[in-house]
Amino acid sequence: DAGVIQSPRHEVTEMGQEVTLRCKPISGHDYLFWYRQTMMRGLELLIYFNNNVPIDDSGMPEDRFSAKMPNASFSTLKIQPSEPRDSAVYFCASSLRGVQETQYFGPGTRLLVL
Amino acid sequence: AQKITQTQPGMFVQEKEAVTLDCTYDTSDPSYGLFWYKQPSSGEMIFLIYQGSYDQQNATEGRYSLNFQKARKSANLVISASQLGDSAMYFCAMRESIGNEKLTFGTGTRLTIIP
């Protein structure tokens, strides 16, 4: 089975531009998570969905960030307008409700905002 | 207070030796799960092993085992017979409460295996 798929793998953009990151979770998983990883702050949970519904977005840094999950197989994380401090690796992960509920991560999108 | 503490920023270990990566956690929740992930230089996060708070036995997955000491709130990862491919960042993480899906990660330990 395919794992979590993220695109693009790398993104370089200029400050002020809109950035859209995409994620396809593992088929059948009912939870989807967006994380950000930086050297300074480590791994931070931004938002997570259950059955396509946002459950907790308390980690979203500010209004410039938004996330959607229009269906069970697709989610987007959008930054508009982007700023240099948004430069980071953004991970998407998915899990299936159960006893263990292990989160499986995608390969990440490395974002550089100039 | 940190919920997950990894006190070893970096470790160097000779190939074929066993290595223990430390992780302590802080929670008042009786039901929680502990996870270890590996992040090689290529960047992906790879799930290694899971331990539930009610599990009676330490979890094992191949060369990985989790030394779970509940009273001490520690969940150390043990890698037996280390290999060069084990060189990576290792993260300990905790999920509190059934129904709460959020993972809290530690700051990680960078493990380097020396040939």
Image: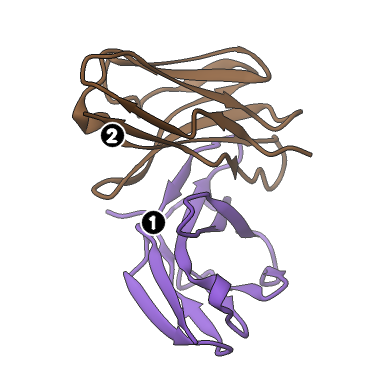
Chain colours: A brown, B purple
Chain letter, disc 1 residue: B
Residue A79 x/y as whole percent: 34, 18
> Relative to A60, is B74 on the left or the right?
right
Q: Is residue A58 visible?
A: yes
Same chain? Circles 1 and 2: no
> Relative to B82, is B28 on the left or the right?
left
Q: Secondary structure at mark 1?
A: loop
The residue sitting at 26% across, 20% down in the picture is: A82
Q: Relative to the observer, which residue lies in front, A84 or B76?
A: A84
Where is mark 2, residue-wise? Answer: A87
The residue sitting at 49% across, 60% down in the picture is: B40
The residue sitting at 57% across, 71% down in the picture is: B85
Q: Is residue B52 visible?
A: no
Residue A109 x/y as whole percent: 45, 35
Residue B112 x/y as whole percent: 43, 76
What kind of residue is marked 2? Ser
| Residue B106, numbered circle | 1
Q: Is residue A78 above or below residue A114?
A: above
Choose top left, top right, bottom left or bottom right for residue A73: top right
